[in-house]
Image (spheres, rainbow, N blue to C red):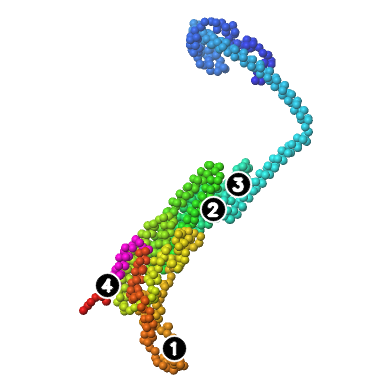
Amino acid sequence: MQKIKSLMTRQGLRSPQESVNDLSPIESFRIPTKEVLRELHEEPTDPQAQQEIINSIEEVYFSSDSFDIVKYELERLPPVLSLQELEEYRDKLKQQQAAVSKKVADLILEKQPAYVEELERITSLQSGLQLAAVICTNGRRHLNVAKEGFTQTSLGLLANQRKRQLLIGLLKSLRTIKTLQRTDVRLSEMLEEEDYPGAIQLCLECQKAASTFKHYSCISELNSKLQDTLEQIEEQLDVALSKICKNFDINHYTKVQQAYRLLGKTQTAMDQLHMHFTQAIHNTVFQVVLGYVELCAGNTDTKFQKLQYKDLCTHITPDSYIPCLADLCKALWEVMLSYYRTMQWHENHDQDEAAVVSSDGNNVIGTEENSFDRNYVKKKLEHGLSRIWQDVQLKVKTYLLGTDLSNFKYDDFIFVLDVISRLMQVGEEFCGSKSEVLQESIRKQSVNYFKTYHRTRLEELRMFLENETWELCPVKSSFSILQLHEFKFLEQSRSPSVSPSKQPAAAVSSALTLFEQYCRAGNPFEIQADSKDEETEDVLASNGYESDEQEKSAYQEYDSDSDVPEELKRDYVDEQTGDAPIKSVSRETLRSRKRSDYNLNKVNAPILTNTTLNVIRLVGKYMQMMNILKPIAFDVIHFMSQLFDYYLYAVYTFFGRNDM
C-alpha cells in the first residue's frame, strides 16, 4: 500500500493509457498498444482456431517470467540453417504471438471497467488516509495537552495504588498457600479423632483451593501431597468400616457413611462392608478355635496357626468342645447382630432422608442419585443376609463334624443341641432360613450319638431290673414328672435351654425376636452356659433319706444316722440325768421309727420304684431329644417304645406270669 501511495504521489493519477506508456521496452513489446488491441479485437477470427494455436505453444514459454525466449530459440536452431524453414518457423511464431496478443487484448478490454473501479477505490482510500493522518495529528496534540495537565505525582499515586492492590492480592494468596501447607497437621489430628467426614471435607476444600493457585510452582507439590493424604484417609476409612463387623457403634458408623458419601463412594462402601463381614466371620471362628486348641495343647507351638480351619477343628478335645462351641456362637452372634444393626441404621436413615426430600424437592437430580444409592444399598443388604448366614452355617457345621460326640454325656450332648437349636432360631429370625446345613450336620451327629446312648441305657436298665428290690420309692405327695429335670423343657415357652425361672417376663419376650431382646446388651448364648448347671428340684420325701443322686436313691441302706440326735447314738443314756444307762437303741429300731413316720403320709404319694423313676427319667430325656431333633424324632420314639416294652416285659415276668 505504501508503494502504491508513493507511486501515486510521484506520478499522480493518470489514465490507463498513460500508465501503459511508462512500461519498459520489453513490457511494451509484450503488451500490445491500444490501437493494436483494437485492431486485433476488430479483426474477425475463429475462436476455436485461436484456441488451438494457443494450445500448440510449448509449455516452456509459460514456465516463469525470467525465461529467456531469445536464448531458447537460438539454441534450438539446427546446425545447418535453411531460409525457407526459418521463415516458416517465424510465421508460426508470429501466428502464436498474434493469438496470444488477441487473447490478452480481449482480457484487458474485459477487465478495464474493473480496473477503473479499483483505481477509483484507491483514490478514495488515499483521501481516507489523509483524513486519518489529520486525526492522528490532532490526537497527539491533545495527548500532549493532557500530559502537561496531569502532574507526575498524581500519576505516581495511581501507579502506587495499583501496585498496592496487586500486593494485597498476592499477600492473601500467600496466606492461603501457607494455610494449605499446614493442613496436613490438622488432617492428622482429625484422623486421630476419627472425624472422617471433617477430614475429607477439609481435604477436598484444600484441593479446590490448590487448583485456584495452580499457577504457583509450590502448589503442584502440595496438590500431589493432598492426593496422597486423601488416599490415606480412604485406607483408614476402610479399616474403620471393618470395625463395624464385630462391634457396631451408631456414631462411628454414621461418620463412616458420611465420609463415603462425601467421596461419592456409597456403593463401593457397601461392597467393602460385605467383604469385611465375610472376613470377620472367618477370622472370628479361626481365632476362637485356635485359642482353645493352643490352650489344650499347653505349648507355644505355632504349627496350629498354619492349619486350615477344618483341620484345626479336629484338634479340639472333648473337655473344651462345649466351651469352645459356646464362645464360637457368642462371637458369631456379635457379627450377625452388627449386621442386623447396620440394616436398622440404613432403614432409619432412609426414612429420615425421605422425610427431608418430601419437604424440599428442589434438587431433582440429586434426589434421583440418592434414591438410586438407597435402593442399591437396600438390595445389597437384603442379599447379604442369606450370604452371611450361609457362611455362619458352614463354619459351625465344620466345627460340629470335626469331633465325634458319641461318647459325650447326655447333659453335654443336650447342651450342644440346645446351642445349635438356639443358633438355628437366630438364623430363622436373621434371614428366614430353615438352616438345612445345620440340621443335616446335627442329624448326623445325633443319629450316631443316640444309637450309642440307647444301647448303653438298655444295659443300665437291665442292671437296674436285676438289682431291683421292688420297694416303694419315697417321694413327696405333690410329686409330678414336671418337677424332674428331664421334663423342664415342657414348661418353657421359648428355647429348651431357658428355664421358666430365668424367664420372668416370658409373655413379653415371646413377642420379641432375639435381636430385639439382645440388641443393646447381652448374648442369647450366655444363658446356655448358665442353664447347664441348673439343679433339679428335690422330689424325695422328708423321710430320712438324703441323697443327691438321681438314679441310686432306692439302693441306699437305712443305715444313715446323720439326722439321729447325739444322745440316741450313745450306748447308755439316763432319762433323768443323761448319764444312767437305760437300754441300747439299735439301728433296726431307728429304721422302724423312720418307716413308721413315712407310712403316715404314703397314702397320698404316688407308687413308684427306683427303676420306674429311672425309666421315667429316660423317657423325659428321649422326649427332650425328640423336641430338639425333630428330623430323627421317629427313630427316638421307636427306641423309647423299646425301652418301655423292655420295662413292661420285666414287670410282667416278675409279677404277672403264673408259673405253677
Residue at x 34% of width, y 76% of height: 607
Q: Earlier in the sequence, mark 4 or mark 1?
A: 1
Q: Nearer the viewer, mark 3 or mark 1?
A: 1
Q: Residue furthest left?
A: 660
Q: CA distance from mark 4 to mark 1?
A: 49 Å
Q: Quadrant of residue 174?
A: top right
Please say whether residue 629 is one of the residues in the magenta stretch.
yes
Residue 58: x %, y % from top left: 50, 14
Q: CA distance from mark 4 to mark 2?
A: 70 Å
* Residue range (magenta): 628-649
Q: Quadrant of residue 470?
A: bottom left
Q: Earlier in the sequence, mark 3 or mark 4?
A: 3
Q: Earlier in the sequence, mark 3 or mark 1?
A: 3
Residue at x 46% of width, y 57% of height: 336
Residue 409: x %, y % from top left: 38, 69
Q: Please tell me whether mark 2 sits on a helix, a strand or a loop.
A: helix
| Pointer 3 residue | 206
> Which numbered circle lies on residue 567?
1
Is the residue 352 above or below the residue 114 in the image? below
Which amino acid type is marked by label 4? Answer: Tyr
Q: CA distance from mark 3 to mark 4?
A: 91 Å
Which amino acid type is marked by label 1? Answer: Glu
Please say whether residue 640 is one of the residues in the magenta stretch.
yes
Q: Nearer the viewer, mark 2 or mark 3?
A: 2
> Which numbered circle lies on residue 455?
none
Q: Main secondary structure of the magenta part?
A: helix
| Pointer 4 residue | 649
Q: Please tell me whether mark 1 sits on a helix, a strand or a loop.
A: helix
